[in-house]
Image: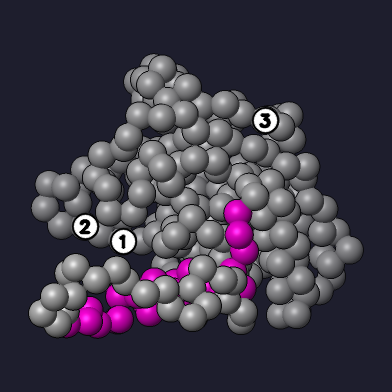
Amino acid sequence: MIYWVLKRIFIGPIVKLLFRPWVKGRASVPNEGPAILASNHLSFSDSIFMPLMVRRPVVFLAKQEYFTGTGLKGWLTAAFFRLTNQLPMDRSGGTASTASLTAGAEVLRQGGLLGIYPEGTRSPDARMYRGKVGVARLALETRVPVVPVAMIGTDKVQPIGQRFPSIRRVGVIFGQPLDFSEYYDRADDRDVQRIVTDRIMQELQRLSGQEYVDVYAATVKAQLAAKPEAEAAPGDAKRKPRKRHGEGTTTGA
């Protein structure tokens, strides 16, 4: 009930008025029955814009950190995510991640729509990164279609680190549902899971037009966080930075 009130009366009308989001392919989302909405992930605001473009409720798997913050800000953030149909996703791997996927599978078994970001985290630079196989495991185990969803321009609305969004137009593109029934009897096969995940990512890349990088976004973020800042020598502030060899090229796995 609260979800619908927020979507239809409070958040929805305000967001649509300010950002004027456009949508393509909404008919690809089934009117009833379970399906996975697999989206690229450019911004915190993706989880707000995409559900507004879908007539049915969408339950998202969101990173667990959004639910465990401290203080007033942490409490408000956790409350917002719970009220907007989002479930905590433990990304540490092992049994914790399996439990999170089990919660998502239950949403699908009850006939709902489950939103998931195959990259596992927001892109650090607006490029698309390698998908994690959790989305394939869910699709194969629950035997549901996967609708690829491309978010357009949300990285400009709220880049990583920007607290308040900038007012500008965004778009949402829903692709044709992907059917993986040929693999249903091999749901536990890791190679099959990778094949299915890569196919989903290929379709997302086609819809979004993003440059694809065949490494995990989390790996890139960790490398960026660990990279020490070079100490500037006297007069360096006046020098133009030199472009490093290979900068801006796609990185292989």
Q: What percent of the width, then of the height, locates residue 122? A: 44, 58
Callout 3–callout 1 Cβ contact below 8 Å: no
Gap in angstroms between the C-alphas marked 3 and 1: 32 Å
| Frontmost residue, 2 versus 47 | 47
Element type at marker 2? Answer: loop
Please tell me which of labels 3 and 2 falls first in the chain: 3
Name the image quarter holding residue 235: bottom left
Snapshot quadrant of residue 199: bottom right
Residue drawn 71% across the image and 74% down it: 194
Q: State the separation of the CA atoms marked 2 and 1.
A: 7 Å
Element carrying mark 1: helix
Numbered tag placed on residue 69 in the rendering: 2
Q: Can you say whether 232 is above or below 157 in the image?
A: below
Q: Is residue 93 visible?
A: no
Contact, CB < 8 Å: mark 2 with mark 1?
Answer: yes
For residue 212: magenta? yes
Image spot of residue 237 (x, y percent): 17, 69
Which residue is more in the foreground, 111 or 138?
138
Observer-nearest residue: 79 or 212?
A: 212
Q: Which mark is residue 145?
A: none
Residue 77 as seen in the image, left or right of residue 129: left
Nearest to viewer (mark 3 / mark 1): 3
Give residue 65's mark: 1
- Place residue 210 in its image quadrant: bottom right
Residue at mark 3 to residue at mark 2: CA–CA distance: 35 Å
Amino acid identity at mark 3: Lys
Answer with left or right where residue 55 lies relative to residue 243. Answer: right
Q: What type is the residue that disc 1 sits on? A: Glu
State which region is magenta. Answer: 210-231
